[in-house]
Amino acid sequence: MSFFPKQQDLKHGNGARGVGQTPAALICLGMICAGAARAQSPTNIFDPAATPARSIFVLSMLVLAVTLGIFLVVGGLLAYALVRFRHRPQDEAREPAQIYGSNQIELSWTVIPILIVVMLFLSTTRVILGTEAIAKPAGALDVIVIGHQFWWEYRYPKYGIVTANELHVPVSDANHATYLTMSSADVAHSFWVPRLAGKMDLIPNRINTMWIDPEQAGLYLGQCAQYCGTQHAKMLLRVYAQSPADFDAWAAQQKLPARNDFFAGSAAAEGEKVFMQNACINCHAIAGTVATGRFGPDLTHLASRDTIAAGAIENTPENLRKWIDDPNSMKPGSLMPSMHLSGKELDNITAYLTQLQ
Amino acid sequence: MSTTQAVKGLDETPVAQRSHRSTGFLREWLTTADHKKIGLMYITYALVFLVIAGFEAILMRIQLWVPNNHFVSPQVFNRLFTMHGTTMVFFVGMPILFGWGNYLVPLMIGARDMAFPRLNAFSFWISAFAGVLLYFSYIGGSGLYAAGSAPDVGWFAYAPLTARVFSPGHSTDYWTLALLLSGVGSIGTALNIVTTILCMRCPGMKLSRMPLLAWLYLVMNGLVFVTVSPLTAAQIMLTLDRYLGSHFFDTQAGGSAVLWMHFFWIFGHPEVYVLVLPAFAFVNEIVPVFSRKAIFGYPAMVAASVGIGFISLSVWAHHMFTVGLGPAGNTFFVFATMVISVPTGIKIFNWLATIWGGRVIFATPMIFCVGFLFQFLVAGLTGIMLAAAPFDWQLGNSYFVVAHFHYVLVGAILFALFAAFYYWYPKITGRMMSETLGKWHFILFLVGFHLTFDFMHIPGLLGMPRRIYTYEAGRGWEGWNIIVGIGAFFQAAGTLVFVYNMLRSYKTGKAAGPDPWDAWTLEWSTTSPPPEYNFAVTPTVHSRRPLWDLKHPEDLDSDYE
Amino acid sequence: MMSDATSIPMGNAAAPEAPWTQPYRGTVGMACLILAESAIFIIFIVAYIFYIGKSLNGPTPAQVLETPYFGTVCLLSSSITVHFAVAALRRARTSSCTMWLAGTVLLGAIFLGTTAQEWYRLIVKEGLTIQTNLFGTTYYSLVGLHASHVIVGLIMLSLTLAFSIFGRVNEHHAEKLEVLSLYWHFVDAVWVVVFTVVYVVGK
């Protein structure tokens, strides 16, 4: 990521267009804010990596500049008044002149704030319209996001893919963005990946939409931002922006049904039997098998994911085994119950699931 | 009942000695309908809950000290933040402000008591019971071992998380019922204060001559009627959903989760103005006295306060910018929210103009007001940031918002309350509080406040959402959370110094006399503490500052009306 | 800092000001209560209007509701009778007041009776309960909220009627009776709104 934004970035997207002439001072201010934390924080709102986040960033610099100015002027006057007019021992005798008011002064400090408000309001409206009121570009990738307690379901209707917790999108521009259509299967959640866009809530019986266009490949982090129950804190977001070639390869892999070519008697084959004969199939789906449950995440390509438990746990065989044994020991309040499998069953089922690339 | 005698100097009538002890201490306080005693009970009650809810906050800060900490379980943490928020708003904020209103309003308007003394007592006791009921939830139900049935749905209890299916058991019901009862108490007290102000002012005290505190309490309590009622209605609906199977917020049956949000925030936003207007009231009384100047722009201050009251009813959905209201809805609420900054700014400028050209005395009440002025300014400015909806799409539901509202609640309202304590404690008890301890209180609390709430903005800017029992390492949030936590302990220390000061000064404070601050409103014309009947002779006033006229016959306020 | 006990010099304010009057406490208190209750009703009415046409199943208003003309006429007439009760009491015509109060209670009770009849028909014959659908939810809660306020008002009026029958009410209580009548007028005004929303707009 280059340290200074390219000039074209300022003209990038509708929201930033109008304020592309923002003085360099504002951008410097932004760099000071962002630069300090950029190395340490992958979720810094002042380090935009997509158009929505960027247009918010530019607006926020304007708002910060205005409010900083107001603070310096009013705070400065206040500090001055407290020092200049403090009581001195020699003043004991008389009370100061009692001034009850002045209509002109009242008018002036009513009109000036109104003007500032109008200016801020217009700038804000421009960004709202630029983000929310634009038509969906024809080349956009559609993804349906459904919030659950405590994981994320992603569906790609054009590709026929159903996956969970790790959202893959192609690197794009404003004409080829990823368009998210969002709702919830249970309670209210909120999708927040600060470097890509502002947050948008996922609410049951309601459809919300937002779009993102990551400019560079990479992993973007976030998490659920609307309290949704016990494990709200561990409903993490991982957005993988990939080059179009990598994304197509990923999608092609995800479209395939699950592996089932295990040698008879191998641990994986045994594990598949354990899975299909237990209640796992009531909650989870594995394409190409009898497991078609939708209450929990789709596991068809579980092994292709870096994490389990909505980003909370690294996806290693040890962790996976421990998770299946007793999810609540790792994520207390998770809605997945312990399946009370024997040690052997756990070994086998883990062997099976780790094969599902 | 009233004579038409002018305020005949300071009322030096000695407080009637109790000639018989037929009423014990406990019985006297349990059955009193005297506004001063009820006010003090409200205040004491609120201070107890302040300590309890503060303790809950400290537990949370310890849990958040480092990433993936195991100090408390997620279930306990979720109960802690729910109870902390609910307690602070309903069982600290509301009662302490109602308490001060109860104590001061009749005294400042020259009245004998409130309009409906028995309703006053009833309102206090039902509110008090409600707080006890809420805290009973910790041990009710499954008991302490299972962390009880204390509510864990957040203080705004969004649907459908509060539906029976997602919140089984009774924890949500404790929340609902406790707040319903406290709401009844709030409406009762508000009715009392409004009626008292409109019907019981002493002769000559036209509305345009009332102390600004009375105006602000009039607006605040008028607001309570249309603020608390929507919450009451929504809670009735929630209870019908949970117990009679209705579908108000049942998304499976076509109900709307967003409807709860609308109803809650139609309550929730004006509620914060209910909490802040009395803070303005205290500052309006204290800053002029310690600047030795009349308040600048009394009519503008009244207009601004009334304007804030009305506009506050139209801004609620700025808490819902991320819900997907659409550009038209979002734009309207951006506008309304930004507009409310205009009358708010007018107030700040008028305070500045009051100080300007004055002779500022930095006694402890004034020092806390200075803290209020700077901190309220900052809080208002971060509010403007949040009002810009796209900025709010990033900042909303993050620690930036938590920092903003604590800046208002603690930095502005609590500081103004501390100022009020130091200012009126002599009137209530007849003794002065220690200035030295007061300054220690201020320093400790100021350091703690800024350590906690200045630095709390930063994790918000770095993507840390609120209401999470732990957080991931590597997001840049760690160090800030530690600094925030350290500040909490400084604030606790400052509060302990304050409580100690109040207790010690009761016994050993310097005698205050009726008017230790050389102030100008009616409460300073009676003894400290006031007799039960407040004034031996109902005063008649001819200006906004009756005691100024008394002390400065050469320069009467009434000449300038 | 303390001044001596001298009276305030009058200065320019020597001229006597207008006689000092303030409103009656009871009226202001009742106005406050009415304001708060109006806010509660408005929320229920908003919910009703919001959910019009949104039920996923079950009977619709047009299918099952019968407009309660008779009950409405009774309730609105009771506002007239209570007004006459207050007027009578002001002129110390206590027996006339008793009669008008009795009429008010009777008319109010008839209204409640018709509501009860309506609910019985809806629940038993039409199978509409608060659980059935969004219409059931909002209908029973709104009409029920109103009915509960009618009940409270009837209790207060009945108590007053009882006192009046025993000769304990006289012209000095006129202001207090007027405050109660304000509450009753409010309850009737709410019914006008509920009636319009439920039986006219919502059908």
Image (cartoon, coloured by chain):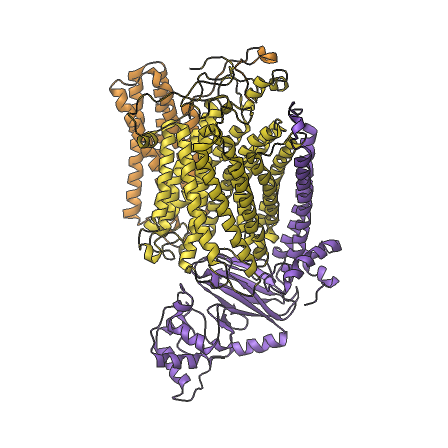
Chain colours: A purple, B yellow, C orange
Q: Residue furthest left?
A: C166
Q: Position of residue C95 (x, y in %)?
A: 28, 16
Residue B535 located left or right of residue B379? left
* Badge count: 0
Q: Position of residue A261 (x, y in %)?
A: 45, 86
Residue B220 located left or right of residue A9? left
In this rendered view, identify the residue nearer to me: A287 or A50. A50
Residue C134 located left or right of residue A104? left
Q: Position of residue A317 (x, y in %)?
A: 45, 78
Q: Position of residue A272 (x, y in %)?
A: 39, 81
Q: Residue furthest top?
A: C15
Residue C115 versus residue B302 in the image, above or below: below
Residue B238 located left or right of residue B488? left
In this rendered view, identify the residue nearer to me: A72 or B436. B436
In this rendered view, identify the residue nearer to me: A264 or C6. C6
Q: Quadrant of the N terminus of chain A?
A: bottom right
Is residue B491 at least partly visible in the picture?
yes
| Quadrant housing residue B187 | top left
Residue occupying the point 28% across, 26% down = C159
Residue occupying the point 63% across, 28% down = B297
Is residue C136 at least partly visible in the picture?
no
Residue C203 versus residue A60 in the image, above or below: above
Residue A226 versus residue B21 in the image, above or below: below
